[in-house]
Image (tube, grey):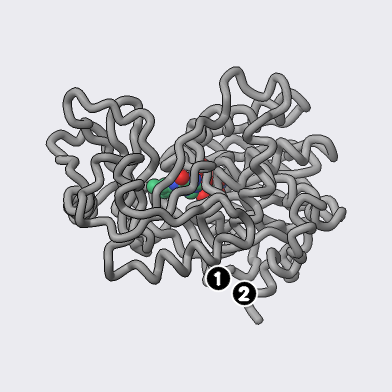
Amino acid sequence: MTARECDFLIIGSGIAGASAAYHLVDRGSAILLERESQPGYHSTGRSAAVFAESYGPRLMRVMTVASGPFLRKPPAGFADVPLMHPRGALFVAREDQRSLLEDLVKELSELSDDLQLMAPEQALQLCPVLKRGYVALAAHDPTVMDMDVNAIHQGYLRGARAKGAAIVTDAEVVALERRGERWRARTKVGEFSAPVLINAAGAWADVVAGLAGARKIGLQPKRRTVIVFDAPAGLDMAAFPIAADCSEQFYFKPESGRVLASPADETPVEPQDVQPEEIDIALVVDRVEQASTLRVERIVRRWAGLRSFVKDKNPVVGFAPDAPGFFWLAGQGGYGIQTSYAMGLTAASLATGRGLPDAVKSYGLTESDLGPQRLWA
Ligand SMILES: Cc1cc2nc3c(=O)[nH]c(=O)nc-3n(C[C@H](O)[C@H](O)[C@H](O)COP(=O)(O)OP(=O)(O)OC[C@H]3O[C@@H](n4cnc5c(N)ncnc54)[C@H](O)[C@@H]3O)c2cc1C
């Protein structure tokens, strides 16, 4: 059987594969292979859609800061709508969490001085549904934004397509083989071949490594649950910030006239089409009702998605040392949308032998901070 050939074969068309394709098409031809009938069915379509430069480990925050200018002001034609909208975030601490929040603000001040401690009275002015007496201390980050994830994802895909990339759906890669200088991928819709294979398979990235015979990175998918429920009648929450527990026990935010909330659960599971569990729904209801005057009377939507991490919680971006032409783009955890622009740029730059782009190198990052070898040291 003859294989369809290209320069870069990308497995997975979530935000990671899409942003990598967006950047790679300037350097060669690309094909994205997607198992599902539409891109974005898994983690990318299940996020909370928050952009926060004050969220996550330092490397993720660097990638977020480096993605900000593009997401705030994308090039003409990238999308018909703004990609981000102001939201703001309020990190709240109970009396017993006070020092946790103070330490968090200190740590985060290295990359941004936007996060400011505030007294409970001020916090309640910004988010009047928080319970008086629950909040001992708060920190406000006015720069946090809501993202239009679909517009961002479609923008990358459209941009890649405009420069010749093909997105092939219903194309699960079931076998991989290195023949000479090229990878050959087998799917039920045909075979595809390229010298460089980009593994952007989200929670399945280690499964794909197994197909290629490459050493795995110990990727652990973790389930996270989200509910959307009715806001109290007559209360306009549109301008409220996200309220988030400072040790990530819950968060809630306005969502198109309703409230979106999560218990910020992180349950390790196998890669799968994950669904919410009743226990996590009960947890989020309990935590939101303890911290706020909100009552969860009618849940209108519920879902769960996978956030996938390696042991140091940083992303894995770089060539596998043990499998020529096999490139890792995995471990985006809970930050894959907000970091997507810089992550795709970095992947494309490294996969074409140009080293780290200045936008991330200027923060002191090195290729070994990102590459897979660090995980086996
Ligand atoms: C509840 C929740 C809240 C989140 N909130 C945020 C947030 O507020 N901000 C933020 O930035 N991030 C957030 N995230 C994280 C973000 O959603 C992920 O980091 C990001 O979507 C990961 O993108 P991905 O492309 O790596 O994975 P995916 O979107 O899962 O894409 C991987 C794709 O690979 C395909 N695939 C797998 N194996 C194969 C194969 N063998 N052949 C072909 N295709 C294959 C899959 O079908 C899938 O479509 C959240 C995640 C969850 C679950």
Identity of the residue furthest to the left in this view: 297
Q: Nearer the viewer, residue 370 or 329?
A: 370
Q: Quadrant of the C terminus?
A: bottom right
The structure residue drawn at horizontal position 64% and vertical position 54%, both measured from the top left corner, is: 329
Q: Name the side, left or right, on which 371 lies relative to 271.
A: right
The structure residue drawn at horizontal position 61% and vertical position 49%, both measured from the top left corner, is: 64
The secondary element bearing badge 1 is classed as loop
Q: Name the side, left or right, on which 7 lies relative to 342.
A: right
Residue count near mark 1 (Cα–Cα under 10 Å), binned few <14, some 14–19, many ≥20: few
| Camera-nearest label, 2 or 1 | 1
Residue 361 in view (yes/no)? yes
Mark 2 Cβ inside 8 Å of ligand 1: no
Residues under numbered marks 2 and 1 in contact, where contact means CB atoms less than 8 Å apart: yes
- Mark linked to residue 312: 1
- Residue 192 pos. (x, y %): 70, 41
Kindly identify the amino acid type of the residue bearing the numbered disc 1.
Asp
Kindly identify the amino acid type of the residue bearing the numbered disc 2.
Leu
- Residue 305 pos. (x, y %): 39, 48
Residue count near mark 2 (Cα–Cα under 10 Å), binned few <14, some 14–19, many ≥20: some
- Residue 22 pos. (x, y %): 71, 36
The structure residue drawn at horizontal position 35% and vertical position 40%, both measured from the top left corner, is: 126
Tell me: residue 204, above or below residue 374: above
The structure residue drawn at horizontal position 56% and vertical position 50%, both measured from the top left corner, is: 114
- Mark linked to residue 375: 2
Q: Name the side, left or right, on which 105 lies relative to 275.
A: right
Q: Quadrant of residue 76?
A: top right
- Residue 316 pos. (x, y %): 63, 61
